[in-house]
Amino acid sequence: MIRGIKGVKDILPDEVGRWQLIEATARRLAEVYGFREIRVPVFEVTDLFARSIGASTDIVEKEMYTFQDRDGTSLTLRPEATAGSVRAYIEHNLSASPTAQKLYYFGPMFRHERPQAGRLRQFHQFGVEAFGCAEPAADVEVISLLWRFFSTLGLPDLTLEINSLGEAGDRPAYKAVLLEFLKTREAQLCQNCRRRMATNPLRVLDCKVPECRAATEGAPKLTDHLSPHARAHFDAVLVGLQTLEIPFLLNPRLVRGLDYYTLTTFEVTCSHLGAQNAVGAGGRYDGLVETLGGSKTPAVGFAVGLERTVLALPGAALPTPSKLIYVASFGPQGAPAGRRMLYELRALGIQADTDHRASTLKAHMKQADRLGASLTVIVGDDEAAKNCVIVRDMTSKEQVELPLSTTAINLQKRLNTA
RNA sequence: GUGGGUGUAGCUCAAGGGUUAGAGCGCCUGGCUGUGGCCCAGGAGGCUGCGGGUUCGAAACCCGUCACUCACCCCA
């Protein structure tokens, strides 16, 4: 038997309802907020990701699905969609358009990691990118969309954490200060954190080991080393959130892993998701458009992990299935009459079905029950001969005889008034 | 890449060295020959993940391997 690839999952019919609800909610809210959909390719030239995400990040170093095109060009399955969106934004000169600055997208992303709860090698994201606005109000708008999305779906026990990474110049300066501090505590840090001191000192602050957290308790805070402009921007974002009454938690330890983030970063976590508890995250990336060859353009966005959203979605959020009419037809005259009835019902836009394998009324009734039909139209040879059908209400068991020719239209009225 | 857990019927799980590997749910048939659910009776369905070893005897113990899963790293 050929199996699916490790870390790549089928989304089966029984779970698709949850996905459709989430996608419809995302799409509707994004449009309400003035974002417009963009569809970018699932693969791009490798260099695009290396330059945007950061050459020394885990994603680029060891998690990308990279392959050679026939001419030798290195291509990569997208590990995220911001890079592609920015590329498209520059390539099609969207900055010249007064209306195309706010984009949203859906789609699969690919990262070669060991799968675990809430983490797959092919996973799906919904995300937005707002280009061209450096105002704190843009950060607040994006965060408020993210928060509204989760609350509309009714995800329980969410926390919005927020931090500022400062402007481009602030981080290197802070890194130096932090490193000085860490050196004085090196003996108390875990093996991992000692390694991180060399690779990514900011991550030490985010370590889960209690000893490390204790050791870094008095560490200098990035938010104390912000430039005046970065400080003012951050404060304005926080005030903006307070104005909208969106609850947040300041987390000076919150560090985003992608190199392009600047100033505001945020993350929404859900407390009963297991270890991978971030359902959505994002931030500002004012330098990225320029890095990729565009003109200097501020931008802010987020990405939502749809698998994680599905996991956290309460069962009550599931949409109720629509009413189904089952056609139970059998016999040399009844069967063709039934097929015609089915055709007419469907032409009227009524969800109707039958089981072509069933040759007895009993088998039909059983199938109607399993499909959850609200009404069953019975057409046997007797009915066909009399040009009528029997309509059975599956819950009340009431049956009425109706003329064959007007049944479909009758049932349509009955469904509309029910 | 590293570590832990688990692999038995379609699904959820029993059987912890000893006859023919069981149960619930689901499925099929009949009770009910043109009427579903509930009930009753019967039935089908298993190379116990795979390969080796120990043993008179292995689903069980040992080794290997593969898969799934959780966690680390990292991230949505």
Image (spheres, coloured by chain):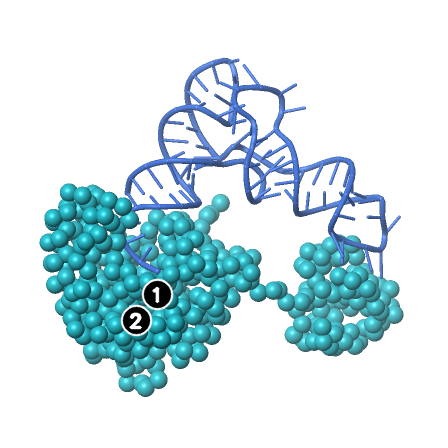
Q: Residue at x 79, y 57 (%)?
A: A361
In-image side of A408 versus A265 (left or right): right
- Which quadrant of the figure has residue A377? bottom right
How much space separates mark 2 and mark 1, taking CA atoms?
A: 8 Å
Q: Determine if residue A68 is in view.
A: no
Q: Position of residue A166 (x, y in %)?
A: 20, 68
Pick whichever of labels 2 and 1 is earlier in the sequence. Answer: 2
Amino acid type for the residue under numbered disc 1: Phe
A371 vs A35: above or below: above
Secondary structure under the numbered disc 2 in the rendered image: helix
- Check if mark 2's residue and mark 1's residue have beta carbons within 8 Å: yes
Q: Can you identify the residue that label 2 sits on? A: A238
Q: Position of residue A401 (x, y in %)?
A: 84, 69
- Residue A248 is tagged as 1
Amino acid type for the residue under numbered disc 2: Leu
Colour that chain B carries in the picture: blue
Q: Position of residue A151 (x, y in %)?
A: 45, 67
Label 2 neighbour load within 10 Å: few <14, some 14-19, many 20+ = many
Q: Chain of mark 1?
A: A
Q: Determine if residue A375 is in view.
A: yes
Label 1 neighbour load within 10 Å: few <14, some 14-19, many 20+ = some
